Amino acid sequence: MADGPLRGIRILDLTHVWAGPLGTRVLSDLGAEIVKIERSLGRGPREVVDSPIGGWIGGEPGDDPWNNKSAFIKLARNRQSVSLDLKSPRGRETFLQLVAVADVVIENFSARAMPTLDLDYEALKAANPSVIYVSMPGYGKYGPYRDWVAFGTTVEPMSGLTNVMGYSKEEPRSTAMALPDPIAGVSAAAAVVTALRRREQTGQGAFVEMSLFESGVSFQGPWLVEHQFGGDVEPLGNRHPGMAPHGVYRCLGEDDWLALACPDAAAWRALCAVVGDLDPSLDLDGRTASHDHIDEVITTWTCQRHKVDATAQLQKAGVAAGPVNSTPEMLADPQVQHRKFFVPYERFSTPIPGNPIRMAGISPDDWTPCPKLGADNAAVLKDWLRYTDQQIADLADQTIITDQPPE
Amino acid sequence: MDRVLEIGNHAAGYCGRLFVQAGYEVVRIEPATRAPAWVRDEAMDLFLHPGKRRVAVDSIELIEQLANQADVVILEADSSDSVDRYRFDQWSTPVKVAITPFGRTGPKKNWQATAHVLLAIGGYTNIMGDPDRAPLSLPGHYLEFQCGQFAYTAANACRLAGERNQVDISMLECVMALSQFTTMMWHCMGMVRTRHGNDFWWVVPTNLFPCKDGWVYINIIQTFWEAFTGFIDRPELLNDVRFTTNDLRMENREAMHEIVEQSLAAWTKSEVRKRAAAARIPAGVVQTLGEVLADAHLAERDFWQMVEGGSQAVRVPSLPFRMDNEPRPSFSVSSVESVSEEHHG
């Protein structure tokens, strides 16, 4: 398991899909001891129904397809798996015993799920007064939209982002990445360390409430303030209100492009020296006014070059530029390779993104692959709760714990 | 409580904002030159810098003195060499975080980049936009703010453990850490994810559709298919062999989209929201910034903070997480103090 500054912090992870598991992955990389509490169908049924997005680890569903969904595996390193039926009284009781010896419980169910299981904050707090409970439903635990069904994709337009992204005002575009999810995921990690430090100072646990919606809106803060000043905020395509030129330019190749930005006059002069046919004396207003012409000149230059060669030439002159990379190009980038950002600890040497927090004491060399469903039922119940073999066998007999989806 | 020193632009600024909101004392050293923002400087200050002490410092030596008095320092710089110019490695601050475009090691550690460039290198830009047009870059400060969140998390983890440590955060690695499934799709399926406009592509219907007075995003995984047919008043589709599974809906994508467009065209955003809530299907309308500010849900949740400073008081989003339902704090933005070695000493 991973080591790091959060070693000794025990987290019960009931999260699923993207935002929640991303948050606990960040915390696990920092050394937190994560136990993933999963329902028997949490990874899907026994049989293959549809092709999962991202495919199967190793390319095939295998004998236990529920354990081989790559998008799930990507987010589930450095943890143990306990498959526990929280709907059964005995499963609930066992869960609350785990809560009693945990530091953090985190979930991203709908707002109604935990109360339905009689596992709201009051129940958790009764089991452990100093527990930190992080709840992250799509629209939060209360408010008029609390019961709305939410995915990151549907929350993104609600946040205001789609209104300012696109080729033009008439052509809004989504990010295609459900951006509130990764925002909320990293925010959840920030929330957990905030609550842990507060507990260190006060001795008090906490109920930490958050939502995909507010995570998405929080990142639109500058535009929301600008709007109150009467600012005109509209989609600008690939342009920027404070930089010119700023764009994505076609290069040699079928669908090859280069991103370029000039944040200041020095960068502009450097660009002029490389590309030619541009006026290095133009200030920002002048460059903005003649952006169409500048784009034409740059495109004439980039169209004759491969994106990697053009980038190298521009960077050498001090211009911020980079290739628009496809996934294999990104993986092969010399900087990415040098820093070994993608880590092949998982089966079939699958490259999994690392953690951008790099410091002494944390190392991907310690990371462990995603466990199989329920792989650690016995180990966790013995280690955390001192359960006997007989108690564990009884739970298994009643299918309160399991290591596979139901028939 | 920790004393935090913040040096840099939008990433360090967002990190410092998190520390302020958590109750810590933050001193911000204003950069000599501001990085271009997507909004006017005053708007950025009101969002990022309420509650901070803001100082202009005239020497590296004085910055070092301030750093040595802090418990945490967050330094955002435009390259690894720029970090070195601060003599960052010599500072005695217990927890030091450096945020740079490419990190402090590697062949590109001194390359120039903005968020726009890093999103391109890190794989985001390639999948945004239309297939037959230029890829679209992501507007706004998503990347810088995510880097700020990582920096904050790292610094607090170290402080919690009582560790002295030095953290290297690469903005490019923040992009790559936050990819959805592109790398898995490539390695496990041999497929390169490309651009599909607003269509999520692998789940149908999942797309941005026009409605009577705007746009609405629908995301229908199999679980919601039956409810969705009710939502659009087309229950007979449940038995339509073209659409019974997601794989079939992918095969009949155009026909599916046409049906959805016809249904949504008759409804306003408000009607879509009411119907989606009643049918319990995932749908979200495109809200304007004004609509977000007027949103009833956010208002009832007391989401906004009032911030004073500059020419007017404004409403600013509070943090995305809230402890024990505590009241949202209010702050003001201070003016920048000039600090010289003479005055500091």
Image (cartoon, coloured by chain):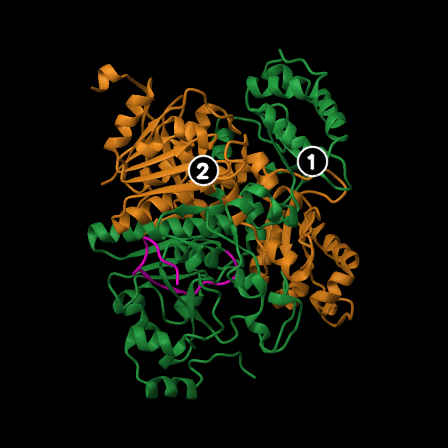
Chain colours: A green, B orange
Q: Secondary structure at mark 1?
A: helix
**In the rendering, at what x and y percent does residue A191 appear?**
36, 50
**In the rendering, at what x and y percent does residue B265 appear?**
72, 49
| Mark 2 and mark 1: Cα distance apart in space | 24 Å
Q: Chain of mark 2?
A: B
On screen, A355 above or below A9?
above
**Mark 2 highlights which residue?**
B104
Say if the magenta span includes residue A17.
Answer: yes
Q: Residues within 10 Å of mark 1 (few under 14, many from 20)?
A: many
Say if the magenta span includes residue B2.
Answer: no
The residue under label 1 is which amino acid type?
Lys
Magenta stretch bounds: A1-18
Quadrant including the C terminus of chain A: bottom right
Lateral position of residue A57 relative to residue B152, left or right:
right
Q: Specify the label residue A307 is tagged with.
A: 1
The one nearer the camera, A56 or A124, is A56
